[in-house]
Amino acid sequence: MSVQFLTRKTDAHGEQKIAYQQTDTDKSGVGVMFCGGFRSDMTGTKAQALAEWARARATPFTRFDYFGHGASTGAFTDGTMSQWRGDIPHVLDELCAGPQILIGSSFGGWLSLMAALDRPEKVAGLLLIAPAVDMTERLMWDRFSEKAREKLKREGLIYDPSEYDPEGYPISQALIEDGRQHLMLGQTIELDIPVRILHGQKDDAVPWQLSLELAEQLTSQNVEMQFLKDGDHRLSEPAQIDKILAMLEGLLDAPS
């Protein structure tokens, strides 16, 4: 399937191109949208598996790359949560006729929660995979050493070591500061849609306890969590993909 591009204009970065792929767009029923992780793109294992599942089931499916990710335009280091928060709602508005189940992986889990708040009429449910809620504060700033914090303030950018990126993740001071406008934990999250959460208990990037904290904050009573004792952060092994697909099918087939 070829990559297409959607134009989005912002005050901060002018006109940008969001890369996406989409199937069965003529159907008006509930569709599925995959929202990937930090520094990830729409060609990853989970995205590919979901695309194959959607084709087999003839379910509308959308996947895309955020600003500065994958085939989309923009410099990753110019990204902030305010910038990225606008990407999912824009894709929903421009490309999706019916309501969507958002599958948010890690960073995409936090963004999916934001999108459900920003476009409640467009989001029918959430499937969150190791959701990295409040990651700029909880998983970055709070974890940084004083030396790293001082360098970030002084130079505006540091590279955070990660097993998922040999060069380390480039983290800007602007990302940290802007992220504080979008923090969710520690307050009520007014969402009354079905939410499913899957988290590995050997996740060394996003502690599984964050998912418990998130579930407590959601107003929805239709929240189910599953923890995989041997699961890592990626959750991309065949059996783990099967678990994701089973949870998705449960969401789609459940009465609204």
Image (tube, rainbow, N blue to C red):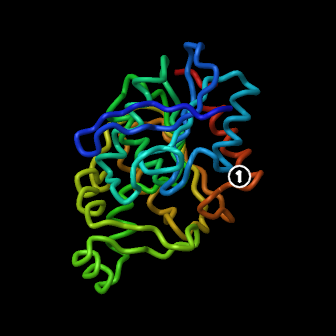
Residue for point 57% across, 73% down: 166
Residue 68 x %, y %: 43, 51
Question: Split into 4 quadrants, where in the image is the N terminus?
Answer: top right
Residue 199 x %, y %: 57, 56
Residue for point 43% across, 41% down: 112
Q: Residues within 10 Å of mark 1 (few under 14, many from 20)?
A: some
All told, the count of numbered labels is 1
Viewer-nearest residue: 160 or 211: 160
- Going by the numbered disc 1, the residue's amino acid type is Gln
Q: Is residue 108 above or below residue 206?
A: above
Quadrant in the rendering for residue 150: bottom left
Residue 214 x %, y %: 41, 52
| 1 on left or right of 214 | right
Viewer-nearest residue: 4 or 143: 4
| 49 on left or right of 155 | right
Q: Is residue 224 above or below residue 135?
A: above
Q: Is residue 211 above or below residue 92?
A: below
| 102 on left or right of 110 | right
Viewer-nearest residue: 111 or 79: 79
Residue 57 x %, y %: 73, 24
Question: For the view shown, which residue lies furthest in the bottom direction?
Answer: 147
| 206 on left or right of 14 | right
Residue for point 59% across, 32% down: 21
Quadrant in the rendering for residue 25: top right
Residue for point 29% across, 45% down: 13
Quadrant in the rendering for residue 186: bottom left
* Residue at image mark 1: 240
Q: Is residue 250 above or below residue 177?
A: above
